[in-house]
Amino acid sequence: YESILPLTSIQRDLYLEMVLNPDNLYNSMGYSVELPKDVDITLLKRVLQTFDNSQTVLRTHIIPSQQPYLEEAYQCVCKSRPIDIEQLNWQGLNLSAEEKAEKLHALAVRTWQIHQQDLVKYSLIDNGQSGWIIVFAVNHVIMDGMSASLHFDHIMKLYIGLKSNESNDIVPANFNDY
């Protein structure tokens, strides 16, 4: 690990809630954005990878303590790792607007295996002729709603700027700015 830190009191409370109620969705949030058909997947992955490399909170895992009388768990920041984007193909599914909204909600607001997985997840959905959809899901233990919204907005602005040649460099915001 790059670093190991104690949980803040709020993170501890959120963590304990997830341990006691693992199927609870209260600590999950996410966003989705429809993108045009000409998505540059390589560029999008590069933007996401740059953010992941520069923002330690995105690489944070929660590890239970072996000595719970000291701390219940710790936040452990992983060293740089390849970004994982789940790619889904919804072409030909003929989903109604309600079915599509339900499927997107299930990807964005999900249960988390708090000790067994990354706490940030990206999904990219090929939606056929109507284009692509990117979904950003995050666990509240590492990011609040406002920070998640700003983070996702910043990613999308950088991607769109690079795609339209308005910018040549990826410069992620400092997470402290969120």
Image: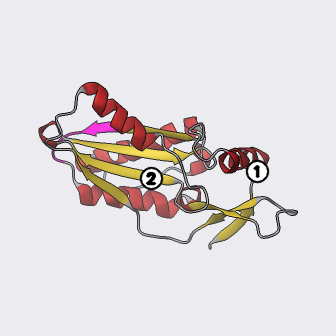
For the question of whether residue 165 can be seen, the reply is: no
The residue identified by callout 1 is: 8
Callout 1, which amino acid? Thr
Image point (56%, 39%), residue name: 25
Q: Where on the picture, by quarter, is residue 171? A: bottom left
Q: Position of residue 117 (x, y in %)?
A: 53, 61
Could you tell me which secondary element the residue under label 1 belongs to? loop
Image point (14%, 42%), residue name: 128
Side of 21 relative to 95 (left or right): right
For the question of whether residue 11 can be seen, the reply is: yes
Q: CA distance from mark 2 to mark 1?
A: 22 Å
Badge 1: how crowded within 10 Å, few (<14), some, or many (20+)?
few
| Quadrant of the drawing holding the C terminus | top right
Q: Position of residue 53 (x, y in %)?
A: 48, 64
Image point (70%, 47%), residue name: 20
Of marks 2 and 1, the one in the foreground: 2
- Where are the magenta residues, as a range? 33-38
The residue identified by callout 2 is: 121
Q: Is residue 73 above or below residue 36?
A: below
Q: Nearer the viewer, residue 166 or 130?
A: 130
Side of 106 relative to 20 (left or right): left
Could you tell me which secondary element the residue under label 2 belongs to? strand
Residue 60 numbered mark, or none: none
Q: Nearer the viewer, residue 81 or 27?
A: 27
First in residue order: circle 2 vs circle 1: 1
